[in-house]
Image (cartoon, helix red, strand yellow):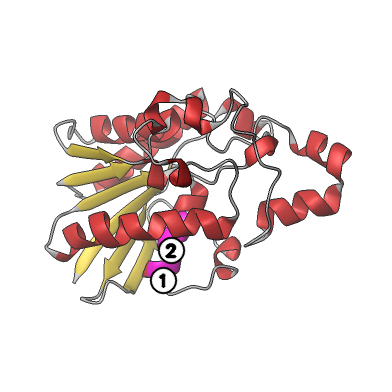
């Protein structure tokens, strides 16, 4: 049997104010840093040690990982960053509050965009300075890989190869792996590990500051799931 630990990145001020974040690169709030430290403390108290860590290329996830490793005195652990673990890209909705979106487009569209599996959000034009193609962290991607907005299906589709080719092989050979990501990228991992349908993951709570510990079979399916500190 093998284990995998997953932690959701901590809070930002904008998210606490019900603003759509997506790929906007925002730092942790004071509460977010405390959530990350809590996660590190819980993991240390339960005797966890890691060989490898995986995270996104967004500041709030990286800062969350730093805080966790500092609490565990594991700053030496090798860290792998990938855009494939970013949360969902919400296109033109990024930076808008829920109230603003509802006022401009209607409550039903807001609901559909936030919870629909294959519902397209308004896309950002490539000429727009906010388009990811203008961000140096994505310069090594081919144009077809750079989103201008994503459905949840498209988000999961870029996460699956990273799981299959990078993370799962390390877990299978016995490496002790920590993944720090975002709610929707964690949902993508959940669909594979827990064998859930895409619609089912919306009903699952993904707490901030409380690590999710999976015990996995040789087939990389969930035998046991525990949320530390719950």
* Residue 146: image location, x then y, percent: 48, 41
Q: Is residue 127 visible?
A: yes
Using residue 91 as the reference point, say whether residue 206 is left or right of it. Answer: left
Q: Position of residue 92 (x, y in %)?
A: 68, 36
Where's residue 59, x and y in %?
42, 28
Q: Main secondary structure of the magenta part?
A: helix
Distance from the alpha carbon under mark 1 to that under mark 2: 5 Å
Mark number, residue 23 = none
Q: Residue at x 19, y 46 (%)?
A: 52
Q: Which residues are magenta?
A: 186-192
* SS type, badge 2: helix
- For label 1, the residue is 194
Question: How far from the left and from the top, in percent, is residue 144?
Answer: 46, 46
Kindly identify which residue carries mark 2: 190
- Quarter of the picture containing the N terminus is bottom left
Q: In what element is the residue under mark 1?
A: loop
Please identify the quadrant where the C terminus is shown.
Answer: bottom left
Tell whether label 2 touches label 1 (CB within 8 Å).
yes
Relative vertical location of residue 157 with respect to residue 195 in this rendering, above or below: above
Residue plotted at (46% across, 59% down): 157
Q: Is residue 189 magenta?
A: yes
Towards the viewer: 52 or 129: 129
Q: Is residue 120 left or right of residue 181?
A: right
Q: Quadrant of residue 163?
A: bottom left
Residue lying at 64% horizontally and 36% vertically, measured from the top left: 124
Q: Is residue 205 visible?
A: no
Q: Is residue 7 above or below residue 227?
A: above
């Amino acid at each position: 049997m093998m284990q995998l630990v997953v932690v959701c990145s901590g809070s930002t001020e904008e998210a606490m104010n019900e603003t759509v974040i997506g790929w906007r690169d925002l730092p942790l709030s004071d509460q977010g840093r405390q959530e990350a430290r809590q996660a590190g403390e819980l993991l240390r108290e339960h005797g966890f040690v890691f060989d490898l860590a995986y995270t996104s290329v967004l500041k709030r996830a990286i800062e969350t990982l730093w805080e966790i490793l500092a609490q565990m005195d594991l700053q030496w652990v090798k860290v792998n960053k990938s855009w494939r673990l970013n949360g969902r890209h919400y296109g033109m909705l990024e930076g808008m509050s829920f109230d603003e979106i509802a006022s401009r487009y209607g409550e039903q569209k807001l609901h559909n965009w936030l919870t629909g599996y294959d519902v397209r959000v308004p896309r950002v034009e490539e000429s727009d300075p906010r388009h990811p193609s203008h961000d140096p962290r994505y310069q090594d991607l081919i144009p077809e890989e750079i989103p201008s907005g994503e459905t949840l299906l498209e988000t999961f589709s870029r996460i699956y190869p990273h799981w299959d080719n990078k993370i799962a092989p390390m877990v299978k050979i016995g490496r002790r792996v920590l993944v720090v990501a975002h709610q929707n990228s964690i949902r993508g991992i959940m669909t594979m590990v827990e064998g859930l349908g895409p619609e089912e993951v919306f009903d699952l709570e993904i707490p901030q500051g409380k690590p999710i510990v999976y015990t996995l079979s040789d087939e990389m399916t969930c035998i046991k799931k525990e949320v530390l500190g719950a």
